[in-house]
Image (tube, coloured by chain):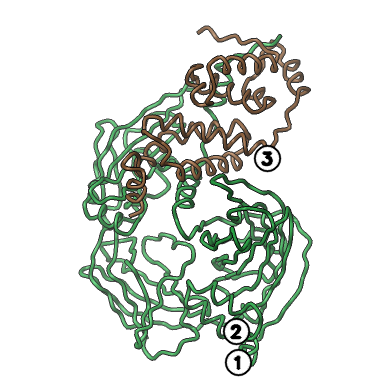
Amino acid sequence: MAYIKIEQSKVKYMDIKIPDSLDRTIEQAIKGSEKTRKRYFVKCASSIAAILLIFVLGVNVSPVFAAYARKLPGISQLVEIVKFDKGLEKAVDEGFVQNIGKTVEDKGIKFTIDNVIVDKSRLVMTYTIETTEDYDDLYIGEMKLSDSNDIGLETGYDIDMAPNSNFKEKKKKSATINVVGPEKGFPENIIIKCLSFKSQKENSSKEIKGDWTINLKLDKKLMDVKPKEFVINKAGIADNVEFLIEKMKVYPTNVEVKISMDKESKVIYLNFINPRLEDEKGNQYPIAPIATPIFSPKECILKFQSNYFNKYEKLFFKADGVYFVPKDNDELIIDLENKKVLRDGGFNIQLAGEKENVTVRDKKYDLQLNYVIKDEEVKREAATRGLMGGVWFDSNLYDENNNVYKYHRGDMHSTSECKDIEGAFNIINMDKKPKILIVKIIGASKGIYKPINVRIK
Amino acid sequence: MEGLAIGDAAAGKIDKVTFMELLQQRKEVLYRIAYMYVKNEDDALDIVNDAVCRAYSSIKKLKEPKYFNTWVTRILINCAVDYVKKGRKLLPFHEEIINQTIEDSCDNYIDLYDAVDSLRGKYKTVIILKYFEDLTISQIAVIMECSESNVKNYLHKALCDLRVELRESEF
């Protein structure tokens, strides 16, 4: 007979590392069950070796082909799928599309990549899933994108899960996978590897693991299409916030606009409210539905739906206002000894209790620091625009000795205006309790609400 | 506003904000329990994902927030058991390994953290809840939706399977 020492096993249990992605998983799960357009954003990772099958279906970007392309079966359906992005719709219309039509089947699920629309900055694949099984709905579960050497693409992608496609009756659905172009552009050969699907039946979901691998050879002609580049260097202003629209790159799939701020500027982390491009005929090109922009203090690159195939004389950059963070006050500093917020960037952030926990293992120290954001403007904007958090923090926390801590964010957003936004920093495994905690504020839903209109062409 | 719609539908019982708050307090426990079934991060996150999805979509069924923890734990355990049952991630832990573990440990102590991998279904659940989450027999009975005597039976059977005797530590 053997014996068990419970407390040792329990320490191991308590030591199970809580991954940083837990919050994201929860967020996604909730979004997934409430949103009509079910999308999620995943970082590509490297994938397992696969045999490379190369096949090419050339597409000439010529009017002759365009005329031919419109007659191709499935193109009208393709137009239907990409309707969420007017730029893509136009691109398809102009024949800027590569037909793939490659199907793989495993576990009774047929996975097809129908077409791709691609240039250096963006790749949009249209896919179809089909099954004879009796599922209420079916989604792509895990997917990996890699190059021919099985190295994961250094980019993010976004799958439109198309939950409202009446799958139950049709047993088939089509939607898009949106991939942001890596800095170097896309490799010619891309391996798309689906590792699982998620099926839905009577409120219970289950995962179907398998292997659905498709090798794509992207058409070089499409990828080599040079963007139309414009140097703009025009200043825009909203009250006392000045910014400079530096340049614009017009790709067939999207338009990149680079905006920077003056060194002297009193604000950083500019976020435009409802930014869009508009031509003289009043055609609007909103933000392209691709991955969220990365925060950077002094500049941002906005990606708009493309106007590559449109004819226009004038082009305007418009927005309803800007959110920003004051430059000399962009930190949240918390005095843990006196339980006081020393600086809060002017966002009225207050402590809402802390939970301390000295764990049994090596006297490590865990801290859960709750806060509330009481600023009326931040709350109102977060509620009306459905922004998580309302104030966004950097992923590193520092103490008085400049030690770095990673934290699990416990953001909760309030959906009604009157309620405070609550959140928490959960830090585990500290050697001792810090006296002071400092974290950078990298964005907040507070700013100037005045229309911005800058002519850029 | 998304939150309100849910609040209304549930006749003011529990809205999205409350759900998020309650979930935040419970998430680490849920993750650890999920982890015990699969012993790897990806699968544990998958289970949490399934559980949160299921919980959120059946939020209406929760009568009062005070039962949240029990309710969400039950959902998570069901998801974990389903996940393992589908043969997706069976842990390669069999009796030989248990024997090995026992033999290897010269002082005849085995580690319940590893040993629990050899158990299945209810037996595993009952061990996790009792010895890792420190719940009482009656709390476990509520979560597992069975009688207290059933819980005791499962517990007894599980320990027999492990062929161990429990020596609760004296501090």
Task: Confirm or deny contact between disc 3 and disc 1 (CB under 8 A).
Answer: no
Asked whether the viewer can see residue A370, the reply is: yes
Task: Give the residue pinned by disc 2.
Answer: A95
- Which three-letter amino acid code belongs to the residue tagged 2? Gly
* Chain identity of mark 1: A
- Against A198, is A258 above or below? below
Instruction: Specify whether A208 is left or right of A238.
Output: right
User: Which numbered disc covers residue B86?
Assistant: 3
Looking at the image, residue A114 sits to the left or right of residue B30; the answer is right
Compare residues A238 and A445 and report the one nearer the observer.
A445
Residue at image x 28%, y 30%?
A337
- Of the residues tagged 3 and 2, which is closer to the observer? 3
Which of label 3 and label 1 is nearer to you?
Answer: 3
Q: Position of residue A401 (x, y in %)?
A: 37, 38
Q: Chain of mark 3?
A: B
Residue A250: where, in percent of width, then height? 48, 80
Which residue is tagged 1?
A63
Query: In this view of the protein, can residue A158 be seen by the observer?
Result: no
